[in-house]
Amino acid sequence: MNSEPETLPIIHLGTQSADSYRLLVENVTDYAIFMLNPTGHVSTWNLGARKIKQYEPNEIIGKHFSVFYTSEAKNREYPAYELREAQARGRFEDEGWRVRKDGSVFWANVIITPLYNEEKTLIGFSKITRDLSERKKAEDDLFKAYEWLKESEERYRLLVDGVTDYAIFMLDPAGNVATWNQGAQKIKGYEAKEVIGKYFSKFYGQDAIRQGYPEHELKEAKAHGRFEDEGWRIRKDGSSFWANVIITAIYNSKNELIGYSKITRDLTDKKQLEEKLFRTHVELKESEEKTRLLIDSVKDYAIIMLNPDGLVVTWNAGAERIKGYKQQEIVGKHFSSFYGREAIEQNFPQYELTKAIENGRFEDEGWRIRKDGTAFWANVVLSPIYNEENRLLGFAKITRDLTERRRNEDLMKKNQELVRINNDLDNFVYTASHDLKTPITNLEGLLLALMEDLGPDVEKHENILSMMRGSIKTFKNVISDLTEITQLQQETHTSEKVYLSEMLADVNEHLKGLINASKARVELETESFEFLQYSRKNLRSILFNLVSNAIKYAHPERAPLVRITTQMLDTGTHVLSVSDNGLGISHHQTAKIFDMYKRAHDHVEGTGIGLYLVKKILDNSGDRIEVSSKEGEGSVFSVFFK
């Protein structure tokens, strides 16, 4: 993958005590997170488990977890099978039907992980259940990053150490390995005693070491706070694997570098789902302090805590980047500072808090205000946090800036509206041009009848009659041009091999009268290419209009000379140029001549449609035309074909 993995938002606990940290985990409502003892009996129970499975803690703690399974699953002893598989493989994941207290079933994603103490004695299992019935899987994966918090540093450490699919370890400031988990052992092949204290360059190839790439990674992580890369890495046995690596510089409260977290993911045979799940483990650290430091470094999401009254309690780097306030400027202020005047007058901030309490969660998209007064389109998720006595402690608020997405959606809607209007105009022109043909024909007939009725007096009115005939001819030409324009929108033309010499001969034949009358010379040079793969009808229209214009706009003091040349660019583009020695075009006119009914010289007969047709044909095929000209010397029209 070349795209940067999405950064997951994590609820910022700030400098809350261990009790507050535990309360945040226990109050998770969208995931059932609980512990089983070694025999499979429930030993802990969180709010998410109560919400999903409907049991109160006093109803389920001490009961065997098989109560969550269907009769068919229990008959084939599937719950016991899950525990055996988790213990045998270090982890068990499954999706299937599970049963709530009221007997209803839901489709669940279940992850069971065995937990061992330092003596490698099994002390139980962690069990995480996710209700996928009405959830999008992608949102679950992202939100799961906030749900895997544990009650204590010990359980948190056991969870990290038990990860086997990812190498998660720490480096000291010099780059030496300080910690080593089972995933690192599995992926890289080293035992902890073989690698702790050693420089981490041993995981890189000789070329990377000679180029100083390991040192470069640490330098970049220190300079930017984070470094991510994908490339070949080396296992203990010398084999290579394609790895995604994230190195994060870790600082203490005094802003002193205390080391680096390094997470390596083997992408050789990984699925996209596993890549998203990996982001969960990217954020895991060995202690609550390291977790806090990591949360503070999140920059893509504003992750803050509010007290029950809506006052800002904590503030992370993402909040500062998105909203513009420094921590000292906003902590203690009401979160309505981020809302527009109209929203405040409608009491919308308080409405959000009320709905979050009523429903357990509130999500919204709308305009929010930065410190500098500019507005941005935000996705906001607000979750209430309770303690053991169900007393409201505050709210977790996560904000994401979606302004660019909103802008793109608005542009798409405008483009769709413009396309609709353009199609309506084309249909109108097409219909009008056809409906006007009959009255024009009638006018021609009436003019002939009038001339017959005048008899010998026709010569007296010849001047007026001539102007009438000219007007009718001009009207017919305009209708013909309009019809041709609308046909460009409705017709599709198959490209074919068209030889330029044959096409020019056909054009010259139709312009024979104009060429002879003006004593024009039309020359063709095809050294670069002799044919084009293009619509025959459209190429003829392009060549016909450019050559006829070159002759029509001739200089009165010299016979027209029209030269048609070809050129092949390095990019493979074919350039067909039509140059003349005519009147030329003034600089302020060159930008207008491709508009409908725009002409550089009004004394020449024409409707101002020809160059408009040429440009529209080229726009439809994804090609383009350019013009360069000098007044009194001539012009060059260059057509660029892909």
Image: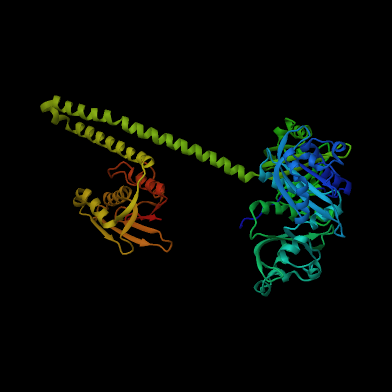
Q: Quadrant of the N terminus?
A: bottom right
Q: Position of residue 46 (x, y in %)?
A: 82, 41
User: Does residue 547 lie above or below 119 as drawn?
Assistant: above
**Rendering quarter of residue 530:** bottom left
Query: Of all residues shown, which one is farthest toward the top?
Result: 453
Query: Of all residues shown, which one is farthest toward the left?
Result: 456
**Rendering quarter of residue 381:** top right
The mark tally for this picture is 0
* Residue 195 visible in the displayed image: yes
Q: Residue at x 24, y 27 (%)?
A: 442
80 or 468: which is nearer to us?
80
Q: Residue at x 43, y 34 (%)?
A: 424
Q: Where is residue 362 in the image (x, y as percent from the top left)?
A: 73, 36
User: Does residue 86 lie above or below 375 as drawn?
Assistant: below
Colour scheme of the picture: rainbow
Q: Quadrant of the C terminus?
A: bottom left
Residue 160 is left or right of residue 430, and the answer is right
Q: Where is residue 626 in the image (x, y as percent from the top left)?
A: 39, 53
81 or 326: which is nearer to us?
81
Query: Of all residues shown, which one is farthest toward the front?
Result: 75
Q: Position of residue 206 (x, y in %)?
A: 67, 74
207 or 632: which is nearer to us?
207
User: Does residue 129 lie above or below 250 as drawn?
Assistant: above
* Residue 593 visible in the displayed image: no
Residue 306 is left or right of residue 550, and the answer is right
27 or 254: which is nearer to us?
27
Q: Which residue is drawn at 71% across and 33% down?
A: 343
